[in-house]
Every structure is written in C-alpha cells, then in structure tokens.
Amino acid sequence: MRILFLLDHCPRPDGECSDHPDAVAMLRGQKKLQALDFWLRNPDYLADELLNAAEAGRSVPGVSPVERAAALLEGDEPDLKSYPMIRWRYGAYEALDDALALLVAHGLIGIDAIGTAPDIDRWDYCLLPAGRQDAQEMRSQEPDLSWYDERAALVLLLAGDRSGSALKELQYAQGEYERTHFGDDIVGILPRVRARLAALQSKTRGGLGA
C-alpha cells in the first residue's frame, strides 16, 4: 500500500517508461524510493524536515510546514504510525523484492532496468493504469487507509524534484540516523523534534506579540 500510494502521487513520466508506454506515473531510482519510504514510515523525521523547510523559508505547495509538523507529532501518532527501517550501505533500507513482485504480478506496476545487466544504473518504477485504479478504490472504499494516502502526498510534496542521493544526504545530516550501526534500526528523534517544534511555535507567537 505504501509503495502504491507513493507511486500514485508521482508525476507522469517525462517520456515513456521504456518497457511500459502506458505508465501513468513514474519514480526514478530505488534510492529515492527508499528515502521516500523512510519519511513515510517515520513521522518524527518527516516533521523535522518540515521544520527545516519552515526555518529556511522554503515553501511546500499547499502546506503550512509548522502546522503539518505539529499534526504529525500530536498524541500517539508518531508511535502508532512508525515503522523502523535499518541503516544499510546507502542509508535507510528495506528489502522491497517481495512487495514489488506482488505489485508486478497483479499488473499494478512495471519496473524498468536502466542499463545492461550486470551493470544496471537505475531502476525505474512505473505505475500502470490498473495500479492507479486500485489506489483510487482504496481511497474510496477503505477510509482507514487514508493516512497512507495523505502521508504519501506530503512526502512527495516535500521531496519535490530532489534526487534520491540528495534526499539521502538530508537524512544522513541527522546525527541519530548517521550514527546508527549498519544493520540496526535507525534511531528515532521524537523528543528532540517535539522540543524544536515547541521552540519554533513559541518564537512565532513571540514575534506576533511584538
């Protein structure tokens, strides 16, 4: 579901997926897919990047970064909606073969290898019409899954057109992420982000009062 919703919020291909000309959306590179999935699965890191955007004055279309960060950190949300990933050679990682194979087997996505084996440069993930239809049906028929959809949309807006390498660099800039040992779950940052949010909200209120 996470992958399907992520792909559904990706843009149309800027050309054709080489092996899937009927693709309705495309995400370039497994590194970017893993980075987006990390933010989707870790609301504390996602909220912190929203606060980075707020402090840098960087706009996120249709989103108030501070308000959305506060919503992500509210109550038990971070604990209930967190799914840790391990730190591996290129950062946050989870083996996606089984999930991707299931989506491919049902005709929901296609995967294009860019390059010639064994020297594959990149994997591109193409959402097919049946995949878009499934995503739309889940939105209308399974309201309990709405948070996946909303979160995926936010992650794609925040990522913008940045590459997988650029997103990984942002995530590595977090000390807790960078210091996690290979093969261990990446450490959460919830207390620090909540404190940062509170300080930013207090500063904003103080500025308005002045």
Image (spheres, rainbow, N blue to C red):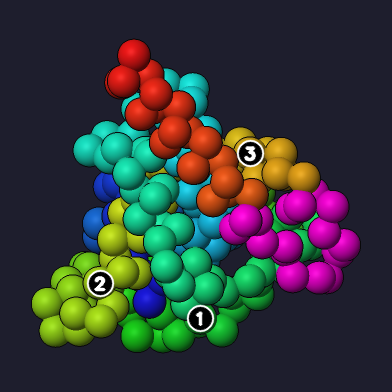
Q: Quadrant of residue 116?
A: bottom right
Q: Where is mark 3, residue-wise?
A: 170
Q: Earlier in the sequence, mark 1 or mark 2?
A: 1
Whole-percent x, y for residue 53 in the image: 46, 31
- Rounded to the nearest angstrom, the CA distance separating label 1 from label 3 is 26 Å
Q: Which residue ends up furthest to the left in the rendered image?
A: 140
Number of the label disc, if any, that sits on residue 146: 2
- Disc 1 versus disc 3: nearer the observer: 3
| Callout 2: SS | helix
- Asked if the residue at tag 2 contacts the one at tag 3, i.e. Cβ–Cβ closer than 8 Å, the answer is no
| Callout 3: SS | helix
Q: Nearer the viewer, residue 209 or 56?
A: 209
Q: Identify the magenta region.
A: 176-191
The amino acid type found where label 2 is placed reads Ser
Question: Does the rendering let one see residue 66?
Answer: yes
Whole-percent x, y for residue 142 in the image: 20, 84
Q: Which residue ends up furthest to the right in the rendered image?
A: 181
The amino acid type found where label 1 is placed reads Ala
The amino acid type found where label 3 is placed reads Leu
Whole-percent x, y for residue 35 in the image: 57, 53
